[in-house]
Image: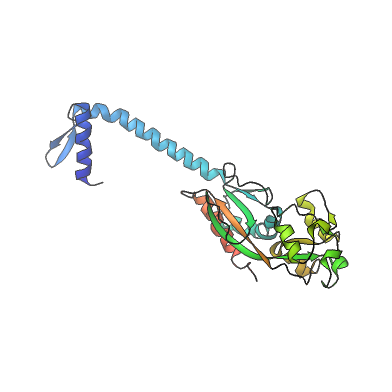
Amino acid sequence: MTPAAIAQQVRKLEADIGTALVRREGRGVTLTQAGRQLSEPLHDAFTMIANGIHELQRAEASRGVRVSTTDYFASSVILPGLGDFWKRHPTLQVSFSPDGNTAPVDLENFDVVIRGDAPGRIWGAYEQVTLVETPMIVCGAPALVGSGKVDPGALPWIADRGIGGDSFDEAVRALGCDPEALHLVDPGSGKMELEAVLMGYGLIFGPELIVRSHLAEGALVRIDADPGMRGTYYAIHAKGPVPKQIRLFLDWLEEVCAPLSCD
């Protein structure tokens, strides 16, 4: 504020109180007795406000970053590079909750929520960062699919718990299969879908990103039939100012994901 603006505010305060708070003295100003009387409680009050803000900032900084994500995104993208993050920020704690892709976006209990959805999805109530885009593919263990030239309708499938919505049925129909006629194997938990696929119990439909390492190792084989669908992972956070520790994590996450998108 300019000196003139401050002087105007002081005059308004003096008018409200009904007495002078400052007086001119040479080229400067000094407090009157009333001004000195008022300055002490105001000083204490502003000190309490400043201390309260400082304590809140310190508590927020020490709390770290709470992230809700999916098992497979955490294991295939976050955990392999997390050591690098902690080398850069050794005192910044990040905690992860593998809530799954179908869990609600909860920004009351989490600072960042990572979810997969269709390209172009907008979470209107929140801010979002597009992390990585990946093909949605169908794959299975070599013992089940051989080289990948198979009839997907003739093989068992792992029941969809991880993706949710109508994506599974849409993909199956795109392959020329009837979702109602499939033989579904339900491992009982979305966390066990991939394990069931690796053991050869059925085909799985999902993001290529989460099975990329298994495909490279030969533990899984992508079948020739292609549903022609893509998926995108997003980092979702609350609107408004972004605390420093959350910004550091988001910047690192974007850096890690930048080379992972593929056709």
- In percent of width and height, residue 78 lies at 65, 57
Q: Residue at 52% across / 45% down in the picture? A: 61
Q: Residue at 58% across / 53% down in the picture? A: 90
Q: Residue at 59% across / 61% down in the picture? A: 131
Q: Is residue 136 above or below residue 9?
A: below
Residue 215 location, quadrant: bottom right
Q: Is 77 on the left or on the right of 37, as rendered? A: right
Decide which of 189, 83 is in the foreground and name it: 189
Q: Is residue 30 above or below residue 18?
A: below
Q: Is 78 on the left or on the right of 130, as rendered? A: right
- In percent of width and height, residue 44 lies at 35, 30
Q: How many marks?
A: 0
Quadrant of the rendering where the C terminus is positioned: bottom right
Q: Is 146 on the left or on the right of 171, as rendered? A: right
- In percent of width and height, residue 254 lies at 57, 61
- In percent of width and height, residue 206 lies at 72, 61
Decide which of 19, 106 is in the foreground and name it: 106
Q: Is residue 71 above or below residue 260?
A: above
Q: Is 135 on the left or on the right of 234, as rendered? A: right
Task: Single out the residue that lies furthest toward the left.
Answer: 26
Colour logic = rainbow
